[in-house]
Image: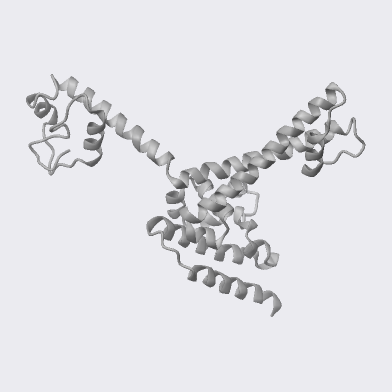
Amino acid sequence: MSDHTDDGWFAGLDRGDPDGARAAIETGTAEEPADWPAAAVAAGFASDESDYYTALHEASLRATREAVREREQADDRQLLHSVRALDDCARMANELTERVAEWAGTQDPEADVDIGYVRELAAREPQTPATERVGSLADRVTDLDDEQTRLRAYIERTAPEVAPNLSALADPVLAARLIGLAGGLEALAKQPAGTVQVLGAEEALFAHLQGGADPPKHGVIYTHEAVHGTDPEHRGSAARALAGKLAIAARIDHYSGDYRPELAADLEERIERIRARGSS
């Protein structure tokens, strides 16, 4: 609504201007409540109360749709979709590589579950209808593998722009994966370090909460060298230290966006102290 209590969100609007109505809904304010339907009728904006609420409903829906569209087009959402696509391509390529090797093994004693073999197979001239089909399937696998490469390159370019501190502490792909698991950079920035630590380990966490299973020490952050490169005895401490810094990095990236190299230095020092426990 407008800044004047005598006016409603509809003040000065044309009923045929949906974008103007959307802007009024999103940015308008009022100092106190008022009988807005009656004001709209008196101003000639609506023919009656029902017509007023119809217009309000239409404007609200448009504002919501545009807000959703803009959110989905945000850089962190593009990163979220790209890393999910990367994982999907990897999963399908792995499954189909096994299928190609199994099928090709009925025709070629040297068949191997390996992308290099699949590429070689795709380049062969088919000799029978069966080898033609295997070769065609091999083509699809190489396409998926190539798409993985392109997606990874896109993520490695984009993640440092979207989340510079998170990308520096982890790596661009892990940063994107954390953003994807959280549902966006803002959602990740609002997560406590303990939640960041176990992102990606939801099934193990659920099993623990149900009883009968140990709590997970880490989720996808296990792929970080600070965790998997630490002795298992101290891996939980390393995971907590890393998660704490990642949580801070996500908040800085979302709320300010300035790069702070001291975060990486602090993390390195902390991990060195943790690892020193095992050698003392």
In which quadrant is the N terminus drawn? top left
Q: Position of residue 147 (x, y in %)?
A: 64, 40
**Residue ranking furthest to the bottom:** 280
Asked whether, in this view, residue 214 is left or right of residue 197, the answer is: right
Q: Is 194 on the left or on the right of 279, as rendered?
A: left
Q: Image quarter for residue 57?
A: top left
- For the point 9% across and 39% down, the residue is 5
Q: Nearer the viewer, residue 104 or 169?
A: 104
Instruction: Inspect this view and state whether residue 247 appears.
Output: no
Q: Observer-nearest residue: 111 or 199? A: 111
Towards the viewer: 9 or 147: 147
Above or below residue 17? Residue 141 is below
Residue under the image location 15 percent in, 40 percent down: 2
| Residue shown at 26% from the left, 32% from the top | 19
Residue 65 percent location from the top left of the image? 35, 32
Tally of marks: 0
As drawn, the residue found furthest toward the right would be 109
On the picture, is 55 further left or further right than 74? left
> Percent from the top left, x then y, of residue 197?
55, 57
Q: How is the image coloured?
A: one colour
Q: In x, y percent, where is residue 45?
A: 13, 25
On the question of residue 257 being in view, the answer is yes
